[in-house]
Image: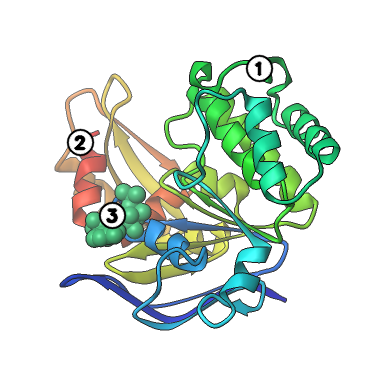
Amino acid sequence: MIAVELRGVRKSFGTQRVLDDIDLSVPAGSVFALLGPNGAGKTTVVNILATLVAPDSGTASVGGYDVRTARDSAKGVLSLTGQSVAVDEVLTGSENLIMVSRLWGLSRRESRLRARALLEQFDLADAARRQVKTYSGGMRRRLDLALSLIRRPEVLFLDEPTTGLDTRSRRSLWAQIRDLRSAGTTIFLTTQYLEEAEQLADRVAVLAGGRIVADGTPAELKSQVGEDVVEIRSADDELLGAVATDGSVDGLHRAITQLAEVAQPDATVSLRSPSLEDVFLSLTGPALQQKEVQS
Ligand SMILES: Nc1ncnc2c1ncn2[C@@H]1O[C@H](COP(=O)(O)OP(=O)(O)OP(=O)(O)O)[C@@H](O)[C@H]1O
């Protein structure tokens, strides 16, 4: 069964075309990651699917419901975690969860039980009675996710769920996402972190220039880049450049000749398997490659 589908979706803001003929489909029960550089249109895709923004043309559906012609049914099966969820800073974590549960029609008692269970699940029990304004970024993100799970959605949209989080909070959120998937929720996330996509996603699509420029499992995408990657690093381990190669002697020779242009006196060369990052850089253009070479 297909949980999320876009067919021929186009969207412009004024004269700026943001999405140009987007096709995507996500099987139920899987984790899908949409990758793209800043401003690629990832949030716009999520907003269209979450029924917040109408496409100019094409169709979009969630849980089999067309987001335009069956908007209420689509809204009934999805949840969106991100900036759009209003967390009341003055209320405690517990009060926020109870308030939203009441809004969804749960009884007072059910709301309290649901809030307690979610606070436990998201490692917020100790902070349950603190005002949200005292929460760290990671705690807010977890509360935000808990709020979007009050109803146990069929499809959960996570727009850059771990941006700005430290490694520990990020890993804890990844664990929660895996648990949700195991419980049967379809997860559609956007991310700028390739490791996140690699860790979580069954399928990945790369959005660039308003189009889907690659779509497949992380392994399929990596195999497009080549067998191996030769990289060159400075004495203090700064990446100076990387080139994909087929692993042949000739290929390696060519790669090293190319890398010699950015070599420094103490630089070292090594051979490694391709990462999703290599795929991303090879697809999203020279500006990013240049940035990577410099970073
Ligand atoms: N409501 C709007 N009105 C005008 N332009 C918009 C609107 N929403 C988005 N845009 C523009 O559309 C483009 C894509 O934005 P979007 O937020 O979808 O990208 P993104 O891939 O999510 O980027 P980021 O990773 O930076 O959040 C940007 O150039 C943005 O300025």
- Secondary element type, mark 1: helix
Question: Mark 2 or mark 1, which is nearer the start of the sequence?
Answer: 1
Q: What is the spatial separation of the Cα atoms under label 1 and label 3, in whole angstroms?
A: 35 Å
Spot occupied by residue 153 in the image (x, y as percentages of width and height):
70, 56
* Residue named by callout 1: 127
Rate crowding at label 3 as few (under 14), some (14 to 19) or many (20 or more) other CA atoms within 10 Å.
few
Mark 2 → mark 3, Cα distance in angstroms: 21 Å
Residue 27 vertical position relative to residue 102 in the rendered view, above or below: below
Which residue type does callout 1 highlight? Ala
Say which residue label 2 marks.
294
Ligand 1 closer than 8 Å to label 3 CB = yes
Contact between labelled residues 2 and 1, with CB atoms less than 8 Å apart: no
User: What colouring does the structure picture have?
Assistant: rainbow
Q: Is residue 9 above or below residue 282?
A: below
Q: Position of residue 253 (x, y in %)?
A: 29, 52
Residue at horizontal 44%, vertical 37%?
163
Is residue 123 rendered to the left or right of residue 258? right
**Residue that badge 3 annotates:** 39
Front residue of this view, candidates 14 and 283? 14
**Figure quarter occupied by ligand 1:** bottom left
Q: Left of 127 or right of it: where is 36?
A: left
